[in-house]
Amino acid sequence: MITLQGKGVFGGIAIGKISFFTREERKIKRIRIEDTKNEIERYTAAKDAAGEELGKIYEKALQEVGESNAQIFEIHRMMLEDQDYNDSVANIITTQEVNAEYAVAITSDNFSQMFASIDDDYMKERAADVKDISNRVLKHLTGNDGEQKEKAGKFIICADDLAPSETVQLDKSAVLAFVTKAGSANSHTAILARTMNIPAIIGVGEGLLSSYEGRMAVVDGFDGKIYIDPEEELLAMMERRQQEEEEKRRLLLELKGKENVTKDGQKIKVYANIGGVDDVAAAFVNDAGGIGLFRSEFLYLKQENYPDEELQFAAYKKVLESMSGKDVVIRTLDIGADKQIDYFQLAHEENPAMGFRAIRICLERKAVFKTQLRALFRASVYGKLCIMFPMITAVEEVQEVKQIVEEVKQELKTEGIPYREQTEIGVMIETPAAVMISDLLAKEVDFFSIGTNDLTQYTLAIDRQNPQIDRFYRPHHQAILRMIHMVAENAHKEGKWVGICGELGADLSLTEKFLAMGIDELSVSPPMILPLREKIRSLTVAEKRDALLNEIL
Ligand code: PEP
Ligand code: MG
């Protein structure tokens, strides 16, 4: 049994086989070959194996998705037998005396470019098919069959690291747990793992070898450990713990529909943090009172190009409709720092966390911002939308944002497109500057939501992405708690509501203090909703309020 220690970012036990996350990109080298006849035979064997594989995929697809959808695999099989394609590969191997991989890659490029240049939609689509079949042959030639999506069953996904965009694109139903060599507990990937209710461990280091592929393992997200080839005794103990956890969840489900009220009658809203339309189900299952943070940037991260107004409108409308009149706080685009998107072509920065990100990008690239605002306001008639702006540091920024909001509303009005006039406008309080001017910001907006992840980063001067300094990331720091208190006071003086949507909102050891401060809403990852509600219902706060507040002053 091999034991590796990392940092657990979402508790839970997972038992299953390891599958390494591989990026589809393959680097093909041009290698000189003397025995070209043997190389052509290698190619033919790989092509036949690819054809056989396509046959199996076709049969499976036929059962699962019906004949018309399965057809594409039959077409791919026929394309593999195309005379021109095969002649091209053989010709490159023979005339240039090169390896089969290189010949397939060149043929793939040439043929797909040729198809792409034809002015016919059907033919253009064939370009992607050529690439697809070539990749399948390459997979058999290189022996690298790491295409995650085609593996049946559920796996413990292991990786060097996972970018947020890669995490959102994983087929969640096939993931038992995440384990990464690198990563930080406060990264977006870790946050996503929590949102997805998946046990996750980060930072296990180089001991996580790719040769463990396919081996049985146990992930203990509570202790941050992964056991490879677990001993029988440990396996039995973990299975028991897994059952206990499930039992606990069942118990918590009994809370569904009950009010979030302390024993002495103080009420608080408990909402869900989500990353996309798919997460609404988790919010539902956990009986969220609303959506307190929809990180809209994940919509952009999933795309290869700017999501247009229609695509965004459809997503926002769906979430609003699904939440049937409950609050839905959608945060506008918050990219930059660890959330990089190629098509935005952001310049390299020495210090991206303090660089061109979030609202700064939106104010500079007004067309992108207005497209999102149009989609949001159009969707506003389908539910109770609250729009929230990230990374605010100045009153002037909020005024500029409000000016653009007015322009968008005016345009919609002129075009006769309906929107909900009462749509609330709020800002995230996640910079020390925003805290210090929260009295002024409260006059400008309808609500605040405190982003403790960035607030901690900027206040304690600690890069949330850097695993080396995780131990100095002190979210319970007096400075942070005082700031939250100050923001709550300033919001309430202006009659505005204040929530917490950073990870600290789910910290049950602080729930009592947040209630003492009068926080109106806590927005947490869906699996934390029920434990938090259980905690709230177990507390008596009023009699201890002064003592609780004195602890932080
Ligand atoms: C935060 O900073 O606390 C927050 C909720 O935003 P994000 O984690 O997406 O930066
Ligand atoms: Mg933030």
Image (cartoon, grey):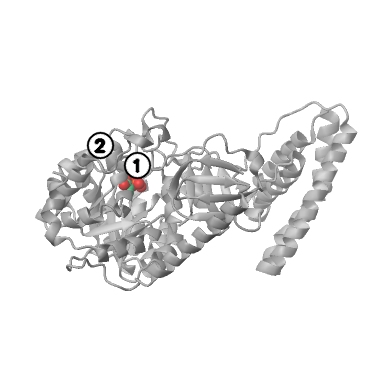
Is the residue marked 2 within 8 Å of ligand 1, measured from its CB? Answer: no
Left or right of 150: which side holds 381? left
Q: How many marks?
A: 2
In the rendered structure, find residue 365 and report the number of the disc placed on it.
Answer: 1
**Amino acid type, callout 1:** Arg
For the point 71% across and 64% down, the residue is 60
Is the residue marked 1 within 8 Å of ligand 2, measured from its CB? Answer: no
Residue 395 at least partly seen: no
Q: Identify the image quadrant of the N terminus.
A: top right
Counting residues from the start of the chain, the first of labels 1 and 2 encountered is: 1
- Real-space Cα separation, disc 1 to disc 2, in angstroms: 28 Å
Instruction: Pick the residue in front: 476 or 547.
Output: 547
- Give residue 398's position: percent from left, percent from top: 21, 46
Left or right of 390: which side holds 22? right
In the rendered structure, find residue 459 and report the number of the disc placed on it.
Answer: 2
Instruction: Pick the residue in front: 167 or 29.
Output: 167
Instruction: Pick the residue in front: 476 or 501.
Output: 476
**Amino acid type, callout 2:** Thr
- Give residue 530's position: percent from left, percent from top: 35, 64
Question: Are the residues tagged 1 and 2 within 8 Å (C-beta)?
Answer: no
Residue 256 at least partly seen: yes
Q: Identify the secondary structure beneath mark 1.
A: loop
Q: Callout 2 environment at 10 Å: few (<14), some (14 to 19), or many (20+)?
A: some
| Outermost front residue | 233
For the point 29% across and 43% down, the residue is 475
Decide: is 84 above or below 30: below
Instruction: Pick the residue in front: 251 or 440.
Output: 251
Q: Callout 1 environment at 10 Å: few (<14), some (14 to 19), or many (20+)?
A: few
The quadrant holding residue 373 is bottom left
